[in-house]
Amino acid sequence: MSEKNWGKILDIETQDASAVSPNIVKRTVFGPENGFWDDYVLRHFVLPEGNSVPPHTHDWDHLIISIGGHGNVVVDGEPWDLEQGNWTCVPGGTVHAYNNVGKGDFVFLCIVPVCGDPQAKKFAMRRERKAKKEETEVATSA
């Protein structure tokens, strides 16, 4: 368990998400890196006015909650409105894109499995390798 069980999202260190969109700001709120969630990652994104995340696809679902501003997600060519307070589940395997369609920042939370987040995936793999190494060391010293 994490040593700190509360905090402000904007105090969390940002992570590079430039592969998603050049100007997007990403923070991991809950995930394996901070000891809260081993299988999933809750990310906080800020997509500046006029920006978008280009069309892409992957195998996992995205669970999205809009917490500020106004955006949309276009799934298989159909726009779904994501103004503040709206949520959506983008099914895995569908082509989708995100757009800031309002004034100011579009702010949203996104939940994906660990395999869907590069930083969380890397952390989980390193932790798994470390655990296997420790198991091997214990077995060989016994």
Image: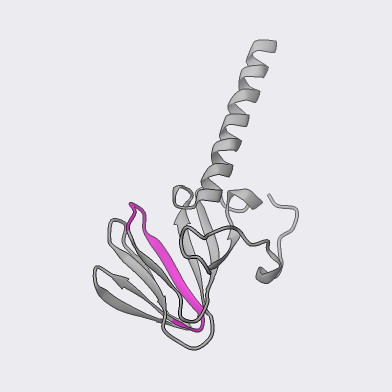
- Front residue of 23 and 113: 23
Whether residue 58 is in magenta: the answer is yes
Q: Residue 142's spot in the image, x, y percent?
A: 68, 11
Q: In this rendering, does residue 92 appear at all? A: yes
- Front residue of 27 and 7: 27
Residue at x 51%, y 60% (from the top left corner): 18
Q: Is residue 93 left or right of residue 64?
A: left
The residue sitting at the right extreme is 3
Whether residue 92 is in magenta: the answer is no
Q: Is residue 63 left or right of residue 129?
A: left
Q: Is residue 39 above or below residue 47?
A: above
Q: Residue 1's spot in the image, x, y percent?
A: 68, 49
Q: Which residues are magenta?
A: 57-70
The residue sitting at the left extreme is 77
- The colour mode here is one colour
Q: Residue 41's spot in the image, x, y percent?
A: 52, 56
The residue sitting at the front extreme is 22
- Front residue of 3 and 53: 53
Q: Residue 118's spot in the image, x, y percent?
A: 50, 49
Name which quarter of the figure residue 27 lies in.
bottom right
Residue at x 50%, y 65% (from the top left corner): 22
Q: In this rendering, does residue 142 appear at all? A: no
Residue at x 52%, y 77% (from the top left corner): 48
User: How many marks do you count on the picture?
Assistant: 0
Q: Is residue 142 above or below residue 104?
A: above
Q: Is residue 39 left or right of residue 30?
A: left
Q: Is residue 141 above or below residue 95?
A: above
